[in-house]
Amino acid sequence: MCGGQGLVTVGEIGERRLIDLMMRQLTPMPDMPLPFWDDASAVSLGGGRTAVLKTDMLVWETDVPEGMTPFQAARKAVVMNFSDLGSKGVRPLAFLVSLGLPRSFSAEAVEEMARGLDAGAREYGAYVVGGDTNEAGDVIISGMAYGVADEDKLMRREGAQPGDVLATTGGFGRTAAAFKILLEGYAAPPGLRDALVESVYMPRARVEEGAALAGSGAVSASMDSSDGLAVSLHELSRSSGVGFRVDRLPSSPEAEEFAELHGVDLSDLVLYGGEEYELVFTVRPGEVEAARSALRRVGCSLVEVGEVTADRRIVYVEDGEEKPIRMAGWEHFKG
Amino acid sequence: MCGGQGLVTVGEIGERRLIDLMMRQLTPMPDMPLPFWDDASAVSLGGGRTAVLKTDMLVWETDVPEGMTPFQAARKAVVMNFSDLGSKGVRPLAFLVSLGLPRSFSAEAVEEMARGLDAGAREYGAYVVGGDTNEAGDVIISGMAYGVADEDKLMRREGAQPGDVLATTGGFGRTAAAFKILLEGYAAPPGLRDALVESVYMPRARVEEGAALAGSGAVSASMDSSDGLAVSLHELSRSSGVGFRVDRLPSSPEAEEFAELHGVDLSDLVLYGGEEYELVFTVRPGEVEAARSALRRVGCSLVEVGEVTADRRIVYVEDGEEKPIRMAGWEHFKG
């Protein structure tokens, strides 16, 4: 403001620096069971129990691609909040919603959204317990997830140690390929196309998987991958003070098929996508089998992708050659 | 959709019918400590304790009047959520925020908002424990409040009985007068103007007052008055299945002064305003002194305004004449 300088906009500084700026203005709550900069927030209930909370909004104009229904958009608003709880090992109990709606919006579409909220919550054993509507220019679905957990079972972003095994709950790259179809006009045979766009329209949160991993006691750090695998690795690196060496790209078969079909780079689809809700986590060496069987019991395979390193570089090793993994993927205001 | 009928819009049906429509799509959580249609939501923690949750959003374009700063808007987003907890007798512990921001919005204003969130939370003994930012066309401050309470102390909208005393925590009409100044160009002498617009820019939630009333055990029903006194009476009537006779209009001195100055109807200012955060509650006959001294201990006066009646009419008695109090005040999509 001084010296006639122009104001810096949100778009110029991006989401991460903006959140840093905001956090500097906030008084930290003493003894928070999860650090402020984690996937969800926790407030101790005493006696070793903690409430776990998350709020995140879905903005129609920027977050809902062509062809997604109001039911699917509302369900996704549940999934994205529940995914953050799941990544901490917490099962959601309740969901609340605050809807922003233009006056001209269809009431029938709002009913459909309510059905989507209910379906999303029930899918994970939770209930929609409250809501509110407001007038807004955009359609906004602002959600809030609540769960309760044992404090000593919470999986944090910090805690990964050099030598730990880096793993995920599944393959990546479907949503990045789907966005190429939905936003850039790429084609795919019907079966493949359906599988890819389904990953965008009907994402699934790894809630039972997160609870199983937390129960195993084998995990040293964990987060979800809603901003893409590369971003998750960079955030885990920042929180745990470690680096990662990815030896095996956790690609989904559909992403591989799409990459081959169009000659696009598979590692780009896998690393730099977003809106995928796999868990990215680290396991203490010697406890991989414990984590693997915990996941197997809930019908999920543990995908080993690499190792935690002491130096803070984040690299993908392909054919013996190290390639840096960039801090790139989904960031609001910078798309 | 069938027979070529046009779609019904949100604006045509209004907020209350829209919420009714949505609720019909939702699976009720068993044994909720508060009914779905109450100021806040509650999820049992077992052992007689309950988590209390509320989410509500502030939309810059429709909810922030001329002259309100980003600090004040953010603080108000805290106050409106905490007011709902306070009306149930619950002290907030934590606040989370999900911000929607246009790319061109000033980062400095966002910092100012963070200061406002922190100030609002700390003012009521709570902390901001989490947040998220998203790209949106409007500036949206979607807040989420969390507290813990004894289940048997919660004050509900239902429970008022004929013969109970109707009371409030203070006088009404300041904000309605302030909106006449801010939106309709009415004038007022500086001292009066400042007091009135202050009620809009820096509202206060009755959190300690609500906790004191809950502690007294004298209250049979309670809600806040964010949509105006008349709406609160109609909602309490609907939830408790009773009516109200208002014998004494709970007008604030500033509203009286403004009404006299401009010859506007004082009862309109008092009954049909909004964005006021007094508690409207009913007290069992014989327990009024207990409620009054509980409030006095936190520096607040109990304002007796009338009586709960068996018939479901809601009337104001002035000079021996009964006038119906309409279901009017603030409703989204219908302003």
Image (spheres, coloured by chain):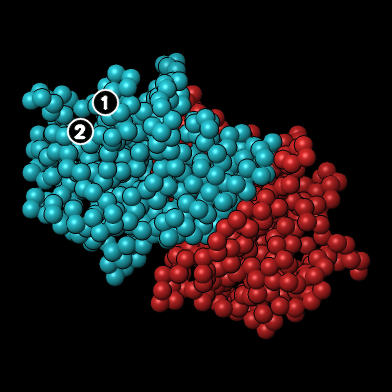
Chain colours: A cyan, B red
Q: How many marks?
A: 2
- Label 2 resides on the chain identified as A
x and y percent of residue A261 in the render?
Answer: 32, 22
On screen, A212 above or below A176?
below
Q: For the point 30% across and 28% down, which residue is it?
A: A257
- Label 1 resides on the chain identified as A
Nearer to me, A77 or B192: A77
Q: Secondary structure at mark 1?
A: helix
x and y percent of residue B290 in the render?
Answer: 60, 79
Query: Residue B219: in sight, yes or no?
Result: yes
Q: For the point 52% across and 54% down, which residue is it?
A: A118
Amino acid type, label 1 = Leu
Nearer to me, A82 or A195: A195
Classify residue A229 as left or right of residue A241. Answer: right
| Residue of label 2 | A249
| Residue of label 1 | A266
Q: CA distance from mark 2 to mark 1?
A: 9 Å
Q: For the point 45% across and 65% down, which residue is it?
A: B51
Nearer to me, A86 or B302: A86
x and y percent of residue B165 in the render?
Answer: 71, 75
x and y percent of residue A83 in the render?
Answer: 36, 48
